[in-house]
Image: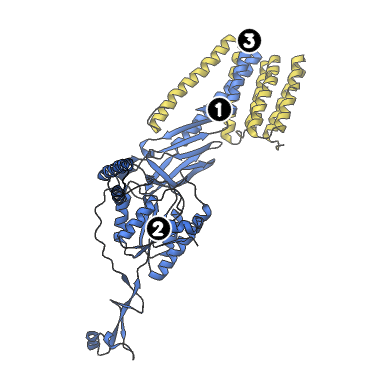
Chain colours: A blue, B yellow
Amino acid sequence: MRLKQCAKSLSLLTLLVFAGAFILDDMAVLLAAGMLLCGLCGQYLLFDRRFRAIIRSVAVERSLSRSLVRRGTTLRVTTLITVTVPPPMQLAITERIPTNVAVQDGVTYVTAETAPSPQSFHLSYRITPVMYGEMHFSGISLLVHDLLFEENIDLSAERFCGPSLFVQPAGIFEPAAKRATTETREIEKMSVLSGLGIRAIREYYAGDDLRRIDWKLSAKHDKLFVREYTGVTSLPPLIIVDLPSRGAPYSPAEFDKMVTMVAGMVEYSIRMYQYVSVLLISGPNILHLMEDEKDLQHCISVLREWMHPVERTVHFYRTQDRSDLRSRVRFTETALDATPDAATLRFLGSLRGLYLSTLQNQRRYAFTGQLVRIMASCTTDEIFLFSLFSGDFSHIRTVAKQAKTAKLLVHIRMPESAGAQGRAAYQARLGADTVEAFA
Amino acid sequence: MNRPGLELIFFVLMAAGALGAAVVSPSMTGYLGVLFLIPVGALLFAARAAHEKGLYCVCSGVIPVIACGALSIWAGLFTAWMLAGVVLSVWGMLEGNDDFRMYLLFCCATFFIACAVQLSNHVLLPLLVFAAGAGLVLFVQVIRDYQFRKEYSGVGP
């Protein structure tokens, strides 16, 4: 229990009056001091009684959107807290979040005003585990206060805790299967080009192609029927959105432009191709994948949920993968052959040795493995990557490289502030097919 | 300026008590008690925030309590009751039946304190009794708090 400013002042006054009574040996002063002491003690006991009543009334129900996740996966936690706060108390409730998780967004703190009947509070937030292992939600913290006193308590008894979250280590990916690219996709509507699937069967009308007559069905019903074949359309792009890191500087205006452009592209893709695949990343962290999503409303709601800076659990900084290192080794070997200077030779030799020793221990990044798997599972011919290019862009280089390996066209959309020359430089460095500014 | 309410009634009663004590036992101390009610009333109406108003009333109200107590312990007790009523009203702690019950409990407890003071010749003994009582209350509370936290938190404070 802590005294607030008011109670501290009253305690000091009580002590002074008691001291005065002792020094003056005056019964009237003692009476005043006794009154003050009695009042303070009474208020304290009253506060304590109400505090206990509040704690006894607390009920907590917590649920997780998933109980078994991989490290770096974001999941939603919803906590329902029921509590009665008698007047004149006030209450602040804070969720006790397990260590080793990063809170992405949502509400983890709520204040309750006085009410005679039980009140319910919903805390809903999203977390991303940054370590693997079992994580336990260890209850809630309450701060109860009135005018004179305040008291906090961590409710970590069994009925306020749980459930447990099991986090698996990331990076256990099986090798990506060979991608079987079908360059077109059949759709359930008419098109100039027809596929092999049958969309519908109807009666023959004069002028229909005789090759489309279903002879077996016509013979059965003694009437001519023709097959209507499915249409063929090109494949929709895979939209990759690189969200900025929370805390890192970025331009809100450019971010808004990016959000608008992504939403427009998603809508266009669903209208044109009937479905869309959207991959949300933030640096080398895969946040969410919407695969073959047909519902525009759902897409928009997911985008609305995710489109903000997020906490990054893994960071890349000028990260080189094995192919980069190999190309650098090749570069040093070529330079060694062409250099006659002894000092430069020594330098290049030691540099080559460093690259080779790094290459020996270099393993494939989990992010690369995840990308390969996603690109293998999404049937697409091109990717559109939206990024603000704030900070390091090693992960974008990885995306572009993996897309190129999978023979996909790479279109990059970036802020206008980079300028035409900047975009050309990025195009050259990333090997993208097109680099354009947000419209 | 805040709108006066229950605290005004208590203040008027306190002033009436102090005046009555001064009339019954006319002395310099009695007049001082009445005089020192003026700052209490001024602060009661001038202070803006409720917590400040209550605190200032307690600080300034101690002097009239002492002055009236010097005339008669019972006059001091009455002034203290009224002062408590003023402060509790200002802090919004006299609104329900439960609050009035607590106020009555405070009056009863302070009555026994006044009896103890009345029966004593010197300050030292009742002072020790008060200190021991407060210490006992705190000791019991510490144990209760430990047990309570053990039940709800699993550990001590």
Mark 3 or mark 2, whichever is nearer to me = 2
Q: Which residue, given by chain and number where applicable, does mark 3 sit on?
A: A23
Label 2 vs 1, first from the N-terminus: 1
Q: What amino acid type should be assigned to the residue bearing mark 2?
A: Ala
Classify residue A45 as left or right of residue A195. right
Q: Amino acid at mark 3?
A: Ile
Q: Nearer the viewer, residue A431 or B43?
A: A431
In this image, A262 relative to A212: left or right?
Answer: right
Q: Earlier in the sequence, mark 3 or mark 2?
A: 3
Q: Above or below — where is B35 with respect to A409?
A: above
Q: Chain of mark 1?
A: A
Label 2: state its secondary structure. helix
Mark nearer the viewer, 2 or 1 = 2
Chain of the residue on which disc 3 is drawn: A
**Mark carried by residue A428:** 2
> Tags 3 and 2 in contact by the CB under 8 Å rule?
no
x 65%, y 10%: residue = A24
Q: Nearer the viewer, mark 3 or mark 1?
A: 3
**What is the crowding at mark 3: few (fewer than 14 residues within 10 Å), some, or many (at least 20)?**
few
- Front-most of residues A50 and A384: A384
Q: Chain of mark 2?
A: A
Q: Nearer the viewer, residue A205 or B89?
A: A205
Circles 2 and 1: CB atoms closer than 8 Å: no
Distance Cα–Cα, label 2 vs label 1: 74 Å
Asked whether residue A437 appears in the rendered view, the answer is yes
Question: Can residue B110 be seen?
Answer: no
Q: Which residue is label 1 attached to?
A: A43
Q: CA distance from mark 3 to mark 2?
A: 89 Å
Mark 3 and mark 1: Cα distance apart in space: 27 Å
